[in-house]
Amino acid sequence: MDLTYLGNVVHAMQCATWSAVPSGSAYNITNHEPASLRELLRQLFGQELDLRYEIRTVPYPVMAMAACAMEGIAAITRREPLLTRYSAGVLHYDMTLANDRARRELGYTPPISMAEGIRLTANWLRSHGHVDHL
């Protein structure tokens, strides 16, 4: 996965605001630090929050079938499904995005590393009392 820390998204928006690119231009914004979801969760929950957690794997066909069923139920109840086929695919397939265009046209470089973003996220979760609910 190639996630993006929120502060870097805001930075990219500032870069776009002050650049001379046409309105409506689209860019991939990433931290440009691909890592596995397992590693990102280890950093956040294990390293920063010092929580005990367990990752369980589910075969993709089972996850996709469950997501399909949840989407069907959501269509009837009009409530957001906990899992969609799209989110199941995002969790299953490797995906990284090139942000070369944003670097070239906007001058975007992520000012906050993923490690720092995870640390800041952990601090925010602690300061807002959300760690007790995880």
Image (spheres, grey):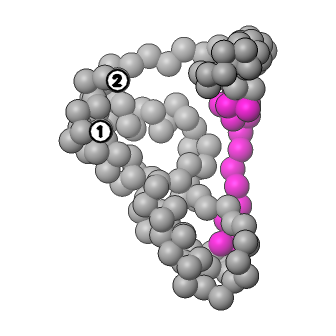
Q: How many marks?
A: 2
Tell me the distance, in whole angstroms, between the alpha carbons under discs 2 and 1.
10 Å
Q: Residue at x 59, y 58 (%)?
A: 30
- Indicate whether 53 appears above or below 125: above
**Dot 2, crowdedness within 10 Å: few (<14), some or many (≥20)?**
few
Q: Is residue 22 left or right of residue 8?
A: right
When the figure is inspected, residue 97 is found, relative to residue 80, above or below; the finding is below
The residue located at (60%, 49%) in the rendering is 2
Which residue is tagged 1?
Answer: 125
Residue segment shown in magenta: 86-102
Q: In the image, what residue type sits under mark 1?
A: Leu
Image position, residue 67 (x, y; %): 71, 18
Query: Is residue 63 visible in the rendered structure shown here?
Result: no
Q: Marks 1 and 2: in contact by CB < 8 Å?
A: yes
Q: Residue at x 34, y 23 (%)?
A: 134
The kind of secondary structure element at disc 1 is helix
Residue 100 in the magenta stretch? The answer is: yes
Q: Nearer the viewer, residue 30 or 125?
A: 125
Residue underneath mark 2: 134
